[in-house]
Image (cartoon, rainbow, N blue to C red):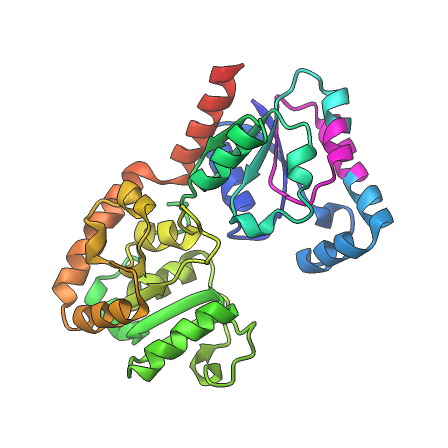
Amino acid sequence: MKIALIGNKDFDTIEFHTADALRNLGHEVYHVDMSDFVNIRYLYNYWFSKFVPKYVDYMFNYLANKVIDFVPDLVIATYRFLPSISIQKIKRSLPHVPVVQLNPDALTTFEKQQVFYSPYDFFFTKDPYIVDFMRNKAGLNAYFLPEAFNDRFHRMPNIDRITLEQKINIDVVAFGSIYPYRAGMLKKLVAAGLNLTIFGNNQNSDQELKKYFKDEWITGERKSEILVGSKVVFNNFHYAEIESVNCKFFEIAGAGGFQICDYKPAVEDFSGIASERFTFRKVDEAIDKIIYYLKQPEERYDMATKQRAHFLANHTYDIRIKQMLDIIFGKL
């Protein structure tokens, strides 16, 4: 099948892994991105698109034409700020081709709500709360599709855990965008005497945490090395994860890392082990569990090994994309 994918081409993004899974499943993929219009960094294109209306019109008209010229059997779009007029144009030119909106993020990323008034045939999102709103309030053809991990990139390093932990030499690691709410919780870990290391962007410019940052944004196999080699990965979900979990949850467990994360009922649905063993409802509970597991390496290893096997069997991108395609073409 020929599939056009509209979204970010950067390595280790959901679009990158979606394209990789589609190709691995035998499909021909045409991946188009804002960088195809003007070859500058994604963030520059993103901010131009927010403040320069004509730039948006020209850029997404260009991308729509590229998709139409490909004559695909399916169109998948991940941008939430993609203007409705572009989807309308694709639908007019390809009237029998399903056009899908795949939203991998929390409800705070709906931009100007272009998604809700664009004529997509299917909507896929990871939060049951949003699915319920889309389907029962907005009357949209919405389906639940959790995030996943890519076992071809987020894979267990080829080294035993003890040796890797000695090499990485990190007690507690956090990674990604360190927003103010995350920074606040991390400072509580530091105040409790935990040895913290952070990989990512100090977006809060928090001077108290500055010395704990590594000047490195981790992706792919390097990410897996850090996640598995650190004794504990602290994964505090975004506050807008109403009934969902984040992508990190799948990447950490899929690679073979051991995480302490927020409690959500969804964790019980996704996990291969009891959620109360590695989740917290209050930050003090997280601190207590981290202190406990730092002293219990064999218990950590056993839990991480069981989780990895469960996630390989249930939560890879290949599995998730098959689920999405089954829904789309089973409903047509």
- On screen, residue 33 versus residue 216, left or right, reads right
Q: Residue furthest front?
A: 137
Query: From what the image shows, is residue 10 above or below residue 229?
Result: above
Image point (41%, 46%), residue name: 244
Q: Position of residue 88 (x, y in %)?
A: 75, 28
Q: Could you tell me residue 52's position as x and y percent?
A: 83, 54
User: Which residues are the magenta region?
Assistant: 61-88
Q: Position of residue 196 (x, y in %)?
A: 35, 77
Q: Is residue 237 above or below residue 110?
A: below
Q: Residue at x 46, y 81 (%)?
A: 209
Q: Which quarter shows the C terminus?
A: top right
Identified at 27% across, 71% down, the residue is 284
The residue drawn where x is 78% and y is 46% is 37
Image coords of residue 321 (percent x, y): 45, 32
Q: In the image, 130: left or right of 197?
A: right
- Which one is nearer the viewer's eye here, 249 or 133? 133
Quarter where residue 42 is shown: bottom right
Q: Is residue 83 magenta?
A: yes
| The quadrant where residue 141 appears | top right
Q: Is residue 53 magenta?
A: no
Is the residue 168 above or below the residue 238 in the image?
A: below
Q: Nearer the viewer, residue 87 or 279?
A: 279
Above or below, comparing residue 173 to residue 195 in the picture = above
Inspect this view and state whether residue 65 appears: yes
Count of number-bearing discs: 0
